[in-house]
Image (cartoon, rainbow, N blue to C red):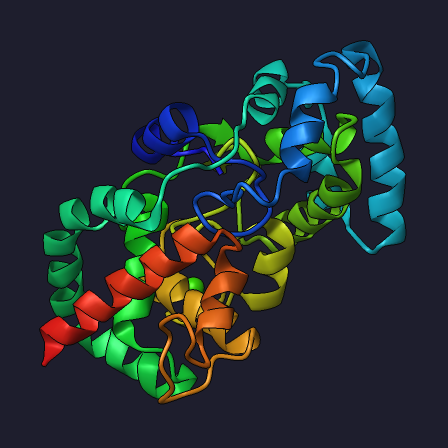
Amino acid sequence: MLRLPLLGLTLGLTFGFALAAGPALAQAQTSTDAVPYRYARTTPRNCVDPAKFPAFLDQMRREATAQGVRQRGLAALDGLQFDPGVVSRDRGQQVFTQTFEQFSGRMVPPRLGRAKQMMTKHAALLSRIEQQFGVPAGIIVAIWGLETDFGAYLGDFNTVRSIATLAYDCRRPEKFRPELIAVLKIVDHGDINPQTAKGAWAGEIGQTQFMPTQYLKFAIDYDGDGRRDLVRSIPDVLASTANYLKGYGWQRGQGWQPGEPNFSVVQDWNKAEVYARTIAYFGQQLEASRR
Ligand SMILES: [Ca+2]
Protein backbone atom coordinates (compact mmCIF):
# COMPACT_ATOMS: atom_id res chain seq x y z
CA MET A 1 0.00 0.00 0.00
CA LEU A 2 1.63 2.96 -1.32
CA ARG A 3 0.95 5.41 1.24
CA LEU A 4 3.68 6.98 3.15
CA PRO A 5 5.56 9.91 1.81
CA LEU A 6 8.77 8.06 2.44
CA LEU A 7 7.82 4.48 1.87
CA GLY A 8 5.24 5.18 -0.76
CA LEU A 9 7.80 6.97 -2.79
CA THR A 10 10.51 4.44 -2.28
CA LEU A 11 8.42 1.36 -2.81
CA GLY A 12 5.43 2.42 -4.76
CA LEU A 13 7.07 4.53 -7.35
CA THR A 14 10.62 3.42 -7.60
CA PHE A 15 10.28 -0.27 -7.14
CA GLY A 16 6.64 -0.87 -7.57
CA PHE A 17 4.28 -2.58 -5.21
CA ALA A 18 0.97 -4.00 -6.09
CA LEU A 19 -2.36 -4.62 -4.53
CA ALA A 20 -3.34 -3.13 -1.27
CA ALA A 21 -4.91 -6.11 0.36
CA GLY A 22 -3.58 -6.35 3.86
CA PRO A 23 -2.49 -4.14 6.63
CA ALA A 24 1.08 -4.10 5.59
CA LEU A 25 2.77 -1.25 3.91
CA ALA A 26 2.76 -2.95 0.63
CA GLN A 27 1.04 -6.11 -0.31
CA ALA A 28 3.83 -6.59 -2.71
CA GLN A 29 3.32 -8.91 -5.58
CA THR A 30 5.85 -11.48 -6.44
CA SER A 31 6.55 -12.10 -10.06
CA THR A 32 4.64 -15.38 -9.88
CA ASP A 33 1.51 -13.62 -8.68
CA ALA A 34 0.79 -11.50 -11.66
CA VAL A 35 -2.99 -11.43 -11.78
CA PRO A 36 -3.55 -8.09 -10.05
CA TYR A 37 -0.88 -6.63 -12.29
CA ARG A 38 -2.65 -7.87 -15.38
CA TYR A 39 -5.86 -6.29 -14.16
CA ALA A 40 -4.02 -3.14 -13.28
CA ARG A 41 -2.72 -2.93 -16.82
CA THR A 42 -5.91 -3.81 -18.62
CA THR A 43 -8.63 -2.16 -16.54
CA PRO A 44 -9.51 1.13 -18.21
CA ARG A 45 -8.60 4.14 -16.18
CA ASN A 46 -12.02 5.71 -16.55
CA CYS A 47 -14.34 2.77 -16.29
CA VAL A 48 -16.86 4.45 -14.02
CA ASP A 49 -18.68 7.75 -14.31
CA PRO A 50 -17.78 10.09 -11.45
CA ALA A 51 -21.09 11.90 -12.01
CA LYS A 52 -22.91 8.82 -10.77
CA PHE A 53 -20.82 8.58 -7.59
CA PRO A 54 -23.56 10.21 -5.45
CA ALA A 55 -26.04 7.57 -6.61
CA PHE A 56 -23.53 4.89 -5.65
CA LEU A 57 -23.19 6.46 -2.21
CA ASP A 58 -26.98 6.35 -1.83
CA GLN A 59 -26.88 2.66 -2.64
CA MET A 60 -24.09 2.09 -0.11
CA ARG A 61 -26.00 4.10 2.47
CA ARG A 62 -28.93 1.69 2.10
CA GLU A 63 -26.62 -1.30 2.29
CA ALA A 64 -24.86 0.04 5.37
CA THR A 65 -28.18 0.75 7.06
CA ALA A 66 -29.23 -2.83 6.39
CA GLN A 67 -26.00 -3.94 8.05
CA GLY A 68 -26.70 -1.94 11.18
CA VAL A 69 -24.66 1.22 10.59
CA ARG A 70 -26.32 4.14 12.38
CA GLN A 71 -26.48 7.85 11.78
CA ARG A 72 -22.95 8.79 12.78
CA GLY A 73 -21.48 6.20 10.43
CA LEU A 74 -23.84 6.99 7.56
CA ALA A 75 -23.07 10.70 7.81
CA ALA A 76 -19.49 9.94 6.78
CA LEU A 77 -20.81 9.44 3.23
CA ASP A 78 -22.42 12.87 3.04
CA GLY A 79 -20.93 15.07 0.36
CA LEU A 80 -18.09 12.67 -0.36
CA GLN A 81 -16.30 13.29 -3.67
CA PHE A 82 -14.87 10.68 -6.01
CA ASP A 83 -11.05 10.83 -5.97
CA PRO A 84 -9.47 10.19 -9.39
CA GLY A 85 -6.03 10.40 -7.76
CA VAL A 86 -6.75 7.22 -5.82
CA VAL A 87 -7.73 5.41 -9.01
CA SER A 88 -4.58 6.43 -10.80
CA ARG A 89 -2.50 5.22 -7.85
CA ASP A 90 -4.35 1.95 -8.01
CA ARG A 91 -3.68 1.62 -11.72
CA GLY A 92 -0.06 2.57 -11.34
CA GLN A 93 1.03 -0.39 -9.27
CA GLN A 94 3.66 -2.68 -10.63
CA VAL A 95 5.08 -6.04 -9.93
CA PHE A 96 7.47 -6.13 -7.01
CA THR A 97 10.80 -7.19 -8.36
CA GLN A 98 13.36 -6.63 -5.62
CA THR A 99 15.16 -9.52 -4.05
CA PHE A 100 15.11 -10.06 -0.31
CA GLU A 101 18.69 -8.85 -0.11
CA GLN A 102 17.88 -5.65 -1.96
CA PHE A 103 14.67 -4.95 -0.10
CA SER A 104 15.82 -5.78 3.42
CA GLY A 105 19.11 -4.02 2.78
CA ARG A 106 17.20 -0.91 1.92
CA MET A 107 14.55 -1.09 4.62
CA VAL A 108 16.17 -2.50 7.74
CA PRO A 109 19.51 -0.74 8.35
CA PRO A 110 18.05 2.78 8.29
CA ARG A 111 15.41 1.76 10.83
CA LEU A 112 17.44 -0.42 13.13
CA GLY A 113 18.66 2.29 15.51
CA ARG A 114 15.26 3.85 15.96
CA ALA A 115 13.68 0.42 16.34
CA LYS A 116 16.08 -0.40 19.17
CA GLN A 117 15.19 2.91 20.82
CA MET A 118 11.51 1.99 20.56
CA MET A 119 12.21 -1.42 22.10
CA THR A 120 13.75 0.35 25.08
CA LYS A 121 11.28 3.20 25.32
CA HIS A 122 8.24 0.92 25.25
CA ALA A 123 9.85 -2.05 27.00
CA ALA A 124 7.24 -2.36 29.76
CA LEU A 125 4.31 -2.13 27.34
CA LEU A 126 5.89 -4.56 24.89
CA SER A 127 6.64 -7.02 27.64
CA ARG A 128 3.02 -6.92 28.83
CA ILE A 129 1.86 -7.47 25.24
CA GLU A 130 4.32 -10.32 24.74
CA GLN A 131 3.10 -12.04 27.90
CA GLN A 132 -0.53 -11.66 26.91
CA PHE A 133 -0.38 -12.48 23.20
CA GLY A 134 2.82 -14.52 22.91
CA VAL A 135 4.25 -12.35 20.13
CA PRO A 136 7.84 -11.16 20.65
CA ALA A 137 8.45 -7.43 20.90
CA GLY A 138 10.94 -7.52 18.03
CA ILE A 139 8.32 -8.69 15.53
CA ILE A 140 5.82 -6.02 16.55
CA VAL A 141 8.39 -3.24 16.43
CA ALA A 142 9.72 -4.50 13.08
CA ILE A 143 6.23 -4.30 11.58
CA TRP A 144 5.64 -0.88 13.13
CA GLY A 145 8.88 0.41 11.60
CA LEU A 146 8.32 -1.08 8.17
CA GLU A 147 4.71 0.05 7.90
CA THR A 148 4.91 3.68 8.97
CA ASP A 149 8.33 4.40 10.42
CA PHE A 150 6.90 3.96 13.91
CA GLY A 151 3.89 6.12 13.22
CA ALA A 152 5.76 8.97 11.57
CA TYR A 153 4.14 8.56 8.13
CA LEU A 154 0.52 7.59 8.07
CA GLY A 155 -0.34 8.97 4.65
CA ASP A 156 -2.42 11.92 3.60
CA PHE A 157 -5.50 10.51 1.87
CA ASN A 158 -8.91 10.86 3.45
CA THR A 159 -9.62 7.29 4.46
CA VAL A 160 -13.36 7.15 3.86
CA ARG A 161 -13.05 8.93 0.53
CA SER A 162 -10.29 6.58 -0.67
CA ILE A 163 -12.24 3.49 0.23
CA ALA A 164 -15.48 4.81 -1.24
CA THR A 165 -13.64 5.61 -4.47
CA LEU A 166 -12.15 2.12 -4.73
CA ALA A 167 -15.52 0.59 -3.83
CA TYR A 168 -17.07 2.47 -6.74
CA ASP A 169 -14.24 1.88 -9.19
CA CYS A 170 -14.57 -1.15 -11.45
CA ARG A 171 -11.33 -2.95 -10.63
CA ARG A 172 -11.91 -4.41 -7.17
CA PRO A 173 -15.38 -3.43 -5.91
CA GLU A 174 -15.91 -6.85 -4.32
CA LYS A 175 -12.94 -6.16 -2.06
CA PHE A 176 -13.62 -2.54 -1.23
CA ARG A 177 -17.40 -2.51 -0.72
CA PRO A 178 -17.05 -4.59 2.46
CA GLU A 179 -14.18 -2.29 3.48
CA LEU A 180 -16.47 0.70 3.02
CA ILE A 181 -19.17 -0.83 5.22
CA ALA A 182 -16.45 -1.68 7.77
CA VAL A 183 -15.03 1.84 7.88
CA LEU A 184 -18.53 3.24 8.40
CA LYS A 185 -18.92 0.87 11.35
CA ILE A 186 -15.62 2.11 12.78
CA VAL A 187 -16.81 5.69 12.44
CA ASP A 188 -20.12 4.69 13.97
CA HIS A 189 -18.29 3.30 17.01
CA GLY A 190 -16.54 6.62 17.43
CA ASP A 191 -13.08 5.12 16.93
CA ILE A 192 -12.13 7.42 14.07
CA ASN A 193 -13.31 10.82 12.87
CA PRO A 194 -14.20 10.63 9.17
CA GLN A 195 -13.28 14.26 8.55
CA THR A 196 -9.78 13.98 9.93
CA ALA A 197 -8.97 10.30 9.35
CA LYS A 198 -6.13 10.26 6.85
CA GLY A 199 -3.97 7.44 5.64
CA ALA A 200 -2.67 5.57 2.65
CA TRP A 201 -4.41 5.88 -0.69
CA ALA A 202 -5.90 2.40 -0.40
CA GLY A 203 -7.59 3.14 2.91
CA GLU A 204 -5.31 1.52 5.45
CA ILE A 205 -5.64 3.02 8.89
CA GLY A 206 -3.14 3.79 11.58
CA GLN A 207 0.42 3.15 12.60
CA THR A 208 0.51 -0.45 11.41
CA GLN A 209 -1.93 0.03 8.55
CA PHE A 210 -5.01 -2.06 9.17
CA MET A 211 -7.67 -2.33 6.53
CA PRO A 212 -11.09 -1.52 8.04
CA THR A 213 -12.28 -5.15 8.09
CA GLN A 214 -9.10 -6.06 9.99
CA TYR A 215 -9.63 -3.10 12.28
CA LEU A 216 -13.10 -4.36 13.20
CA LYS A 217 -11.74 -7.83 13.81
CA PHE A 218 -8.46 -7.24 15.61
CA ALA A 219 -8.17 -3.69 16.94
CA ILE A 220 -8.31 -3.49 20.71
CA ASP A 221 -8.41 -0.73 23.28
CA TYR A 222 -5.22 -1.32 25.27
CA ASP A 223 -4.85 2.01 27.02
CA GLY A 224 -8.34 1.72 28.48
CA ASP A 225 -9.79 5.00 27.22
CA GLY A 226 -12.75 3.21 25.64
CA ARG A 227 -11.68 3.78 22.02
CA ARG A 228 -9.74 1.58 19.65
CA ASP A 229 -7.38 4.18 18.32
CA LEU A 230 -4.82 2.84 15.88
CA VAL A 231 -3.88 6.33 14.76
CA ARG A 232 -2.76 7.95 17.99
CA SER A 233 -2.54 5.38 20.78
CA ILE A 234 0.72 3.44 20.79
CA PRO A 235 -0.61 0.89 23.31
CA ASP A 236 -3.65 0.29 21.08
CA VAL A 237 -1.44 0.05 17.97
CA LEU A 238 1.08 -2.41 19.38
CA ALA A 239 -1.43 -4.62 21.20
CA SER A 240 -3.75 -4.72 18.17
CA THR A 241 -0.85 -5.76 15.95
CA ALA A 242 -0.02 -8.58 18.35
CA ASN A 243 -3.70 -9.50 18.49
CA TYR A 244 -3.79 -9.67 14.70
CA LEU A 245 -0.83 -12.06 14.61
CA LYS A 246 -2.29 -14.16 17.41
CA GLY A 247 -5.58 -14.21 15.52
CA TYR A 248 -3.77 -15.65 12.51
CA GLY A 249 -2.31 -18.42 14.63
CA TRP A 250 0.95 -17.13 16.12
CA GLN A 251 2.39 -19.82 18.38
CA ARG A 252 4.05 -18.62 21.55
CA GLY A 253 7.68 -19.63 21.83
CA GLN A 254 7.99 -20.82 18.22
CA GLY A 255 10.30 -19.42 15.57
CA TRP A 256 9.25 -17.14 12.72
CA GLN A 257 11.98 -17.57 10.15
CA PRO A 258 11.17 -19.31 6.85
CA GLY A 259 10.49 -22.97 7.59
CA GLU A 260 9.50 -22.30 11.21
CA PRO A 261 5.91 -22.48 12.50
CA ASN A 262 5.21 -18.75 12.72
CA PHE A 263 6.53 -17.77 9.29
CA SER A 264 3.14 -18.51 7.73
CA VAL A 265 1.62 -16.02 10.17
CA VAL A 266 4.13 -13.38 9.05
CA GLN A 267 3.02 -14.16 5.50
CA ASP A 268 -0.56 -13.54 6.54
CA TRP A 269 0.57 -10.06 7.45
CA ASN A 270 1.99 -9.61 3.99
CA LYS A 271 1.77 -12.22 1.31
CA ALA A 272 4.83 -11.03 -0.54
CA GLU A 273 7.65 -13.42 0.29
CA VAL A 274 10.29 -10.70 0.22
CA TYR A 275 8.33 -8.48 2.57
CA ALA A 276 7.52 -11.34 4.96
CA ARG A 277 11.18 -12.39 5.07
CA THR A 278 12.14 -8.79 5.77
CA ILE A 279 9.78 -8.63 8.75
CA ALA A 280 11.21 -11.93 10.00
CA TYR A 281 14.80 -10.77 9.58
CA PHE A 282 14.20 -7.35 11.15
CA GLY A 283 12.39 -8.99 14.08
CA GLN A 284 15.29 -11.38 14.58
CA GLN A 285 17.79 -8.50 14.65
CA LEU A 286 15.74 -6.74 17.32
CA GLU A 287 15.28 -9.84 19.41
CA ALA A 288 19.00 -10.57 19.23
CA SER A 289 19.73 -7.04 20.46
CA ARG A 290 17.76 -7.67 23.65
CA ARG A 291 20.06 -10.44 24.77
CA1 LIG B 1 -7.67 3.22 23.42
Q: Residue furthest front?
A: 32
Q: In the rendered image, is residue 149 in sight?
A: no
Q: Where does residue 21 sit, x and y in percent of width and height?
A: 60, 47
133 and 284: which is toward the camera: 284
- Which image quadrant: the C terminus? bottom left
Relative to 16, is 189 on the left or the right?
right
- Residue 286, image x and y in percent? 18, 67
Residue 281 location (% of width, % of height): 27, 63
Q: Is residue 132 above or below residue 206?
A: below
Q: Nearer the viewer, residue 178 or 194?
A: 178
Residue 124 in sight:
yes
Please state which of residues 206 and 102 is positioned toward the viewer in this rendering: 102
Q: Ligand 1 lies in which image quarter?
A: bottom left
Q: What residue sits 40% from the left and 70% below the top?
A: 258
The part of the image, by quadrant, that contains residue 152 is top left
Q: On the rendered structure, is 44 left or right of 113?
A: right
Q: Is residue 35 left or right of residue 94?
A: right
Residue 130 x %, y %: 32, 81
Q: Residue at x 62, y 48 (%)?
A: 187
Decide if residue 6 is on the left or right side of residue 182. left
Q: How many marks?
A: 0
**Residue drawn at x 47%, y 79% as measured from the top left:** 250
Q: Residue at x 68, y 29 (%)?
A: 38
